[in-house]
Amino acid sequence: MSYNTPYIWPLGKNNLLYKFDKDGTSLNNYSIPTDTVPKTAISENSIWIIWQSGYTKIIRFDIASGSYTEITPSPANYLMSIRAVGIDPDGFVYVMEYYMGTDTNYHRIIEKYNSDGTYVSYVDIDVVDENPYEVDFDSDKNLWSVVPGSALSCYSVSTGEKLHSYSNLSNYCIAVDKNDYLWTDGSDGKSINKIDPSDGSTKISITDCGISGYSFGSIKRITVDTDNNVIVLAVVSNGSSEGYIFKYDNDGNSLGNYHLSSANIALYGDLGIDSDNNIWVANNSAGNNTYSILTKIDGSSLTKIGDYGALQDAYQTEDITGLQWQLHSGGPELSDHGVIGPDNIKYYKCASWAEGDTHGGDIDKDSPLASGEIFDDITDQEREQGDTDYRKIYIANEALCPWPGTKAWIVQNTPAPNDQIYISASGTNSDTVAQASGYEFVQPSGPNDPNVCDIGEIPAQGYHHLWIKRVVDNPAMEGYKNKTFQIKIGKS
């Protein structure tokens, strides 16, 4: 699985969503409704933000257009409160809600949305007396939820069945690592704990912050990087308070800590890891409540990026990079907040599809290519005399992200002994058979074959051509009808 999270998305109190690249360069900012809460989840094409005003709506920010829509949950209820949102390994968005139903009981429900904002379904999971605070998903796509200072529970999002429920293991924080172990802040929010999800047993408990004279005051946020290390944003105290980032390996061994600030540490809340395992923290500036500092930690180097607007109180943010939902093996490949997969990799014919020297040219988006449409059957005359045909097809990346490192190879050549398939990524979008007949064509059998066709990066919303050549080279052999072959486009 490949990770790519090129942007950082902190949320400001001045009703702006900010976009930074991994170098810390401010690229843009976008207006969003007032009183949004920095509890965000980033899917392949959108950012989902809870609207604080009554906690009754979700804001879906569309990354491509820079605009937002308001989504009101579907079930009929009242006194409803939205407190958590997360993305599962397949990119579906889940909104966790807490409401009083017509039976006068408080219920907890899970609503499911496609990343484009279309409603899918909801399940009423249980009757509760407290609201959920934070969620994460395991590789089986089950949802883990924290009720502050109370229960740590696991649910099937398809049936609503409660699979596990453990008491006194978490105060506010939860992170599911790549092996599906749970990392929590303990019932008092002052320790770091590794929990076995199958039985709730504590495998590791870290109670000593490792800084002489200081102890953990509160754990603000826990997350996991691509190497399965555990990153903790915490406040430590010895009478005065200091903000720190702590880093541990998956066995709980310390990998170092980073001092952030001694002022306004209550406003630390936004934590994220990018695909290079840089740590990002968004916090209020020392002694000033009017603007915030974005801090990047790269190895041992701590860099304060600068002013990006005041932070919205001391709420914890689910994710500000889009990495969180990628970490489980069941998820698709995410790049620049876009999924590369069957739903947005399409194949098309070239503009001039008729056989002959003029076959080729640019993509024809009105002519999608279906299986079995590339070559027609070889006629008896072609079989007897020999024949060479060319087809130019296009691979279109319709995701909101580039597709780097793309290759093409032949998984299965034709079963007929009298003809062979060859491919080439040479040429341009405008060329035709007249030029392509002079290209080098190859028969790579896999992505690591030295002759593999190296297409390279296909840009977001872009495309690249691939030439296919069929050669009938043994006229004496008996002909085959409906011959098939398979070409794969991918990385591995």
Image (cartoon, rainbow, N blue to C red):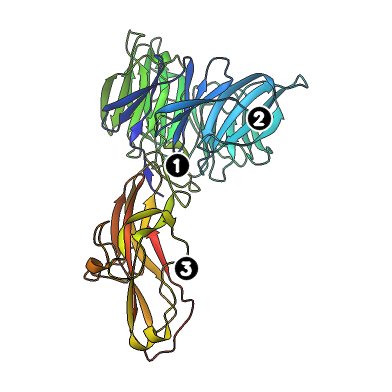
**Residue 383 sits above or below residue 339 on the image:** below
The residue labelled by disc 3 is: 372
State yes or no: discs 1 and 2 in contact (Cβ < 8 Å): no
Position of 217 relative to 64 (above/below): above
- Count neighbours of disc 1 (C-alpha within 10 A) and say few if under 14, some if 14 to 19, many if 20 or more: many
Disc 2 marks a residue whose amino acid type is Ile
- Residue plotted at (31% across, 24% down): 295
Label 3 sits on a secondary structure element that is loop
Label 2 sits on a secondary structure element that is strand
Identified at 23% across, 70% down, the residue is 440
To which residue does mark 1 refer? 326
The mark lying in front, picked from 3 and 2, is 3
Q: Position of residue 325 (x, y in %)?
A: 47, 39
How far is mark 1 from mark 3, CA to CA? 34 Å
Amino acid on which the number 1 mark rests in the picture:
Gln
Closer to the camera in the image, 378 or 322:
378
Between 240 and 329, the residue placed more toward the observer is 329
Dividing the picture into quadrants, the one containing residue 306 is: top left
Rounded to the nearest angstrom, the CA distance separating label 1 from label 2 is 24 Å
Asked if labels 2 and 3 touch by Cβ distance under 8 angstroms, the answer is: no
At horizontal 35% and vertical 39% (from top left) the residue drawn is 275
Disc 2 target residue: 109
Tell me residue 175's x, y (percent): 49, 34
- Sequence order check: which comes first, mark 3 or mark 2? 2
At mark 1, the secondary structure is: helix
Amino acid at the residue labelled 3: Gly
